[in-house]
Amino acid sequence: MEVITTGCIVAPRGFQAGTTYCGIKITKDSLDLGIIFSEYPATGAALFTTNQIYAAPVRISKKIIKKGRVRAFVMNSGNANACTGEQGYKDAAEMVRIAARCLKISEDELLVASTGIIGRLLPMDKIAAGIQTAANSLGSTQEHGNAMARAIMTTDTKQKAVAVRLKINKKNVTIGGITKGAGMIAPNLATTLCFLTTDVSMPAMLLNECLRNSAESSFNRITIDGHMSTNDTIAIIANGASGVTITEKNSDLLIFQQGLDYVTSTLAKAIVMDGEGATKFVQIDVISARSRNEAARIARSIADSPLVKTALNGEDPNWGRIVSAAGYAGVELDESKVTLFINNILIFAKGMPTQCDLNALSRSMKDRNITIRLELGLGNYNDTVWTCDLSHEYVTINAEYHT
């Protein structure tokens, strides 16, 4: 597997991207609108937020994706077009119409997405001009791909993109992806915004299964603040430009799935690493649970605890907060069987703190990467969640993020 770190969304053959600043964001000359386009007919799959309050572009894209044919994405940042009523829905539909006309494709081959502040109507005059400009600037250079990764950013401090090149049937196959997100992160089925491209050909139903598998092992394993977005969308286009076709579950599909998993897990971790105000990347492993669901519930309970997250920010191995968060997750536990490790140092066992090397533990808490391993001693199932700490900077960023 060859990892690609520049121009990632257009790294697969037959894809182009175009971006512009059309005036949605306050900061002038920052990119806020983009298009990803397949030069060839393609299939697509997408997953969306399970938040019952969801944005107009999600409503539109949910309908379009049912046909399984997608050739393009059009998206804006700086305005979520969420909680905007029927006018918001009309505006999202208009974005689709304008982009389809500019790209000379059918309206049912194009997904729309938005991210940014909730509760504001889109400035459609600026959007319309921006879509035309983005469509006229389409290209497949690394600069085009890098610009696309920047165009979807909101409070992100860095662009998030990766691609991989694989060998399937002795042919090169590429999978590329970009994502955004630094706050309002607790995905369920999807992440804030994530767009994927591949030059494999695959039926939409099989592609959807691959996407669902990858999201479950990556984006559904992250949390920053326990707050699910109204706009979560993860979508993929497969255009077959590599000459490789996968139509059934076989060794070729396994290779593709592994590549897709690498892309989505890399992007998901990048979101956590760029969490608003974050200073720590934290992996929480819950081991030997009765079921994976119970392991996941405990891991998320620990990851979403403000007290655990602030202790991590203070570089304090406050094990009491960790075990108590596990205890209120709604899973039956036997305290005498619970064992806790922080950075591979045993700190709690058999209902009691251990006589560990506190100086070594304290030194390890200064590392950027922190690992919490909680062994339940109840079964054979495990789960992992990735999160970050909670800092003063997180409060400052979100206190100043006004509607």
Image (cartoon, helix red, strand yellow):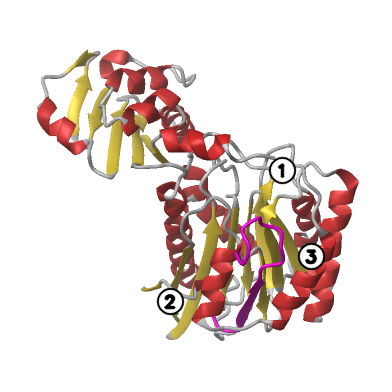
Residue that appears at 76% across and 68% down: 110
**Residue 360 occupies quadrant:** top left
Task: Using residue 304 as the reference point, say whether residue 382 is left or right of it.
Answer: left
Residues 224 and 355: in front is 224
Residue that appears at 61% across and 67% down: 29
On residue 165, the disc is 2
Label 1 and label 3: CA atoms lie apart by 18 Å
Task: Using residue 326 as the reference point, say whether residue 33 is left or right of it.
Answer: right
The relative height of residue 286 versus residue 269 in the rendered view (above or below) is above
The reply to whether the C-beta atoms of the residues labelled 1 and 3 are less than 8 Å apart is no
**Mark with earlier residue (3, 2):** 3
Instruction: Label 1: state its secondary structure.
Output: loop
Residue kind at label 3, given as amino acid type: Lys
On residue 126, the disc is 3
Q: Give the range drawn in magenta.
A: 12-30
Observer able to see residue 205:
yes
Residue 236 included in the magenta stretch of the image: no
Residue 236 horizontal/vertical position (percent): 62, 65
Reading the image, the residue beneath label 1 is 118
Residue that appears at 70% across and 40% down: 403
Instruction: Label 3: state its secondary structure.
Output: helix
Label 2 and label 1: CA atoms lie apart by 37 Å
**Residue 60 occupies quadrant:** bottom right
Classified by dominant secondary structure, the portion drawn in magenta counts as: loop
